[in-house]
Each structure stands twice: as C-alpha cells, then as structure tokens.
Image (cartoon, rainbow, N blue to C red):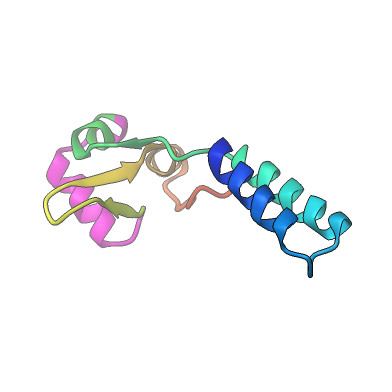
Amino acid sequence: MKRETLLCMGALLRADPTINPRRRDEILEVCRRDSHRRRRRTGTTRQAAEILGVHPKTVRSYAKQGKFSVIRHSGRRTRYDLDEVQAFADNGTQNNGEEK
C-alpha cells in the first residue's frame, strides 16, 4: 500500500468517532505490514520463455493449462509472475506466489 493511501486511511479513521484509537492503530498496523509484502515481479512472454528455456508459444500453452497464472493488462498485453514461472521451472509445480 502506498504511503499516501496509509495517510488518508489514518485521517479517515481518526475522523470517525465510532472507531476507538486502539482499534484504529491495529487497523493501520495491519495495513503497514501488508504494504511491505513481496510485490510481484512480472515479465513478458519472452522473459518467461527464457526462464523456462522454451518457445513463447509453449509459455502460452502452459499458462492455458494452468501451470502458472497470466496477468492480463489488456486484450493484447499479458504478463507473467516471473517468480511463479521460476518455481515452475525449478520443480515443475505451481507456486502461485506462496511462501514454502
């Protein structure tokens, strides 16, 4: 979560008289912790193909089979979670960004 978003949330929570200060601090702390989580490292079909050592068509085929997820930005622009692709390349299984 962006710093500006956290600041706005804090201001809104402080302005709401129905939320006690301790609960407000708990909510903001959870938001701060979540904002430091791993961000997705996304890449193109070509980058995913390089990681796997296959043709880009094979990457699209693997994604269709559900071996890793596709991030669609528009009808023609797709990206892949490169950490997920790397996990598939390493063990041949789905990772879905989960920590082991």
User: Residue 50 location in percent, x, y?
Assistant: 25, 29
Foreground of the two, 9 or 16: 16
The magenta stretch spans which residues?
51-67
User: Residue 72 location in percent, x, y?
Assistant: 25, 53
> Quarter of the image holding residue 46?
top left
Quadrant of the image containing the C terminus: top right
> In the image, what residue occupies the spot 27% across and 44% down?
79
Quadrant of the image containing the N terminus: top right
Residue 87 is left or right of residue 20, and the answer is left
- Examine the residues drawn in magenta and state their main secondary structure: helix
Number of numbered tags placed on the structure image:
0
User: Residue 70 location in percent, x, y?
Assistant: 30, 53
Foreground of the two, 69 or 90: 69
User: Residue 86 location in percent, x, y?
Assistant: 41, 36
Q: Is residue 64 magenta?
A: yes
Foreground of the two, 30 or 60: 30
Foreground of the two, 55 or 3: 3
Residue 31 is left or right of residue 60, and the answer is right
> In the image, what residue occupies the spot 85% across and 62% down?
20
Q: Is residue 84 magenta?
A: no
Q: Eyeballing the image, is 61 above or below 56?
A: below
> In the image, what residue occupies the spot 79% across and 70% down?
18
Q: Eyeballing the image, is 18 above or below 56?
A: below
Q: Is residue 99 visible?
A: no
